[in-house]
Amino acid sequence: MATFPALEPNTRAYRLPRFSVTSQPAWGTDAVRFSHGPRSFGYVLTLGYENLPAADAALLRSHFRGQAGGFDAFTLDPAVTRGHGAADLAPASTLWRYTGPPEETHRSGGLVDVEVELESVRGLVVSGAGLSLTYSLEAGAVTAGSAVAGADLTITATLEAGAGTGD
């Protein structure tokens, strides 16, 4: 699994996570809220780099491309949170992905300002593995009621050797 480049940002902005809570209207009172578990998700981390040498900006660009944009998850190098107690904001085991491409402003002298926005990833992440999924859906006659007669759904997942993490 890849690691974000070891570059200490000039600025960091954190958006704390959401919790699995839904809200339903209720008669004679405010909405009723339901908690669906103690786990949070959706940390957002915005990193600002100012006056980076072009070679360091190229590292960020290359990492973004290497992660297929926002597809592949990665870990953060400790330099990214150096000087900040980030462990209380997001667990050290948190995996991240890009929300979009890095935004660059090129300055004179070959210096570049870069802003990167990352979001936490929850669930299972498989890296270094060949993953193939096969879906087939065969529908028959639909009848009234809660069942669909003659419908058959088959999902086959095959994982080849690789590392997997998840919560």
Image (cartoon, rainbow, N blue to C red):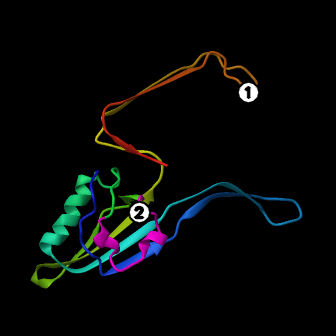
Place of residue 72 in the rendered image (x, y in percent of width and height, measured from the top left): 33, 50
Q: Is residue 89 above or below residue 121?
A: below
Callout 2 amino acid:
Ala
Q: Nearer the viewer, residue 7 or 153?
A: 7
Verify whether residue 8 appears in magenta: no
**Is residue 139 rendered to the left or right of residue 9?**
right
Label 1 sits on a secondary structure element that is loop
Residue corresponding to mark 1: 146
| Disc sitting over residue 38 in the figure | none
Q: Is residue 61 above or below residue 107?
A: above
Residue located 28% across and 72% down the image: 79
Stretch in magenta: 77-94
Place of residue 54 in the rendered image (x, y in percent of width and height, measured from the top left): 13, 73
Residue located 66% across and 17% down the image: 149
Residue located 30% across and 55% down the image: 69
Callout 1 amino acid:
Ser
Q: CA distance from mark 1 to mark 2?
A: 45 Å
Residue corresponding to mark 2: 92
Query: Where on the picture, by quarter, is residue 159?
Result: top left
* The furthest residue to the left: 109
Q: Nearer the viewer, residue 13 or 92?
A: 92
Q: Nearer the viewer, residue 94 or 65?
A: 94
Place of residue 7 in the rendered image (x, y in percent of width and height, measured from the top left): 24, 72
Label 2 sits on a secondary structure element that is loop
